[in-house]
Amino acid sequence: MEKMDEFFAVRAEGYDEHMLNEVGGCRECYAKMAELVPVGTKNLLDLGCGTGLELKGIFERFPDVSVTGIDITKAMLDRLSEKYQGKNIILICGDYFTADLGRECFDTAISFQTMHHFSHEKKIGLYRKIRDSLKSGGVYIECDYMVETQAEEDKWYSENALIRKEQGISDDEFYHYDTPCTIENQIKMFKTAGFSSAEKVFKIENTTIIIAKKD
């Protein structure tokens, strides 16, 4: 396994081509996510924003939207900045688990293919922070790699735990290894975190979009 920031830093150059052409469903889901951002969104939070592929369609719909993007890899953020010069973007190079997301600051929050590296416990804690950062009536749109069965999920988590044990890597260290969850477990996590509703709205192959809403 590689450290998370180092893994993405060395892949920043070819990241866009990889996501658009090699990861099933992503090209379609980038477009769909932009369609799902609610009308009237003025302030948007993008967690794990990477090179900002998901922002292309959003800026086409909302040219003046204010975006706060958080990512752990500076090389990815540098590429995002190059793409969207002149746009209203605040970029934070850091860990979204510890970053201050504020309270009731955003109309909409999004993430794209970033959450499938973490435990249920860590994600629930983060989802609570995301919920708190949203205004009343706000939505969180998550597109991620999700699996069909509990057996698949258990396999990935078990393999991750075994490798970490063999290599002496603690659970709190950010290393790149896929631990996708089932759609059902994702929805449960959103509801545990306090979202009033959560539902799957789009899926191609294992690339799935869920919308969670705050009352």
Image: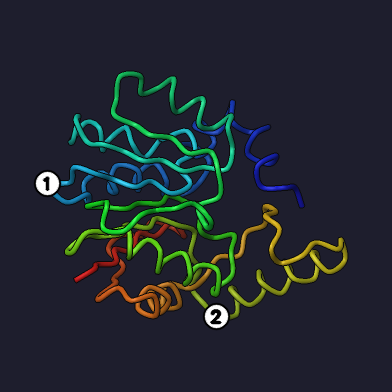
Image spot of residue 154 (x, y percent): 63, 77
Q: Residue 53: which quarter of the image?
A: top left
Q: Which residue is mark 1?
A: 40
Q: Secondary structure at mark 1?
A: loop
Image spot of residue 30 (x, y percent): 35, 43
How crowded pointer 2 is (Cα within 10 Å; few <14, some 14-19, many 20+) is rated as few
Q: Residue 166: which quarter of the image?
A: bottom right
Is 30 positioned to the left or the right of 168 in the image?
Answer: left
Q: Which residue is mark 2?
A: 150
Is 61 positioned to the left or the right of 83 in the image?
Answer: left
Residue plotted at (45% across, 42% down):
49
Residue plotted at (34% across, 31% down):
89
Give the colour scheme shown: rainbow
- Residue type at mark 1? Gly
Is 180 positioned to the left or the right of 43 in the image?
Answer: right
Q: Quadrant of the C terminus?
A: bottom left
Which is more foreground, mark 2 or mark 1?
1
Q: Residue 79, relative to residue 111: is it above or below?
A: above
Image spot of residue 91 (x, y percent): 43, 35
Q: Residue 84, relative to residue 38: is it above or below?
A: above
Q: Secondary structure at mark 2?
A: helix
In the displayed orientation, state which residue is furthest to the left: 40
Query: Sequence-wise, which precedes: disc 2 or disc 1?
Result: 1
How crowded pointer 1 is (Cα within 10 Å; few <14, some 14-19, many 20+) is rated as few
Front residue of 30 and 169: 169
- Residue type at mark 2? Gln
Which label sits on residue 194?
Answer: none
Image spot of residue 163 (x, y percent): 80, 64
